[in-house]
Amino acid sequence: MTDWKQALDYNMGNLGNLVKGNGGIMKGYGELTKAAASKGALCDKTRELIALAVAATTRCDGCIAVHAAEAVKAGATRDELLETLAMAIALNTGAATIYSSRILEAFDQFSAK
C-alpha cells in the first residue's frame, strides 16, 4: 500500500535534484503546464480530473500523488473521480483492443508467405 502524502513529498524532493542538475528542464515543464491551463475554458477541478485519468493510463505515481491532492483542493468528489476513472479504464481497454487488432495485422503480414 502506498502512502500518497509521503510519495508526494518524496517526488517533490526529487524534483529539486533535477532542478539543481538542469534547471531548464523544470523551467520548460513549468511553462508547458502553465500554457495547458492558460485559456481558462476548463475549471481547475476538470483539469485535475483529466490529469488523473491520464495518470491512470500512463501509470505515473508522481502524477497520481500531485493531481489527487490538487483534485481534492479543487473540490472534486469521489463520485466524479470514479466516473473519470471509468472513462480512463474504458479508453485504455479500447486502445488495447485497437492495438491488438493492429498487432494481429502485423503478425499476419510477417507470417504471410
Image (spheres, rainbow, N blue to C red):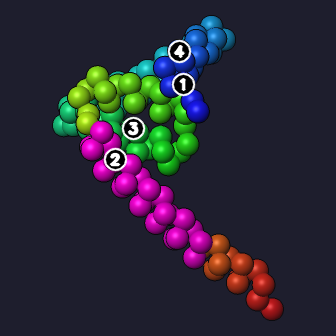
* Overall secondary structure of the magenta section: helix
User: Mark 1 vs mark 3: which is more N-terminal?
Assistant: 1
Q: Amino acid at mark 4?
A: Asp
Q: Are marks 3 and 4 in contact (CB under 8 Å)?
A: no
Q: Which residue is mark 3?
A: 51
Q: Check disc 1 and report the residue beneath it.
A: 3
Residue count near mark 4 (Cα–Cα under 10 Å), binned few <14, some 14–19, many ≥20:
some
Q: Which residues are magenta?
A: 78-101
Tell me the quarter of the image containing the N terminus: top right
Q: Residue furthest front?
A: 1
Binning the other alpha carbons within 10 Å of mark 3 as few (below 14), some (14 to 19) or many (20 upward) gives: many
Q: Is 53 left, or right, of 25 in this rendering?
A: left
Is 56 located above or below residue 13 in the figure?
below
Give the residue pinned by disc 4.
Answer: 9
Q: Amino acid at mark 2?
A: Leu
> In terms of sequence position, does the residue under pointer 3 or pointer 4 come before the other?
4
User: CA separation, marks 3 and 4?
Assistant: 19 Å
Q: Residue at x 29, y 22 (%)?
A: 73
Name the residue at 55% across, 37% down: 60
Q: Is residue 75 above or below residue 112?
A: above
Q: Secondary structure at mark 2?
A: helix
Tell me the mark number nearer the camera, choosing from 3 and 2. Answer: 2
First in sequence: mark 2 vs mark 4: 4
Q: CA distance from mark 2 to mark 4?
A: 25 Å
Please give the label number shown on residue 82: 2
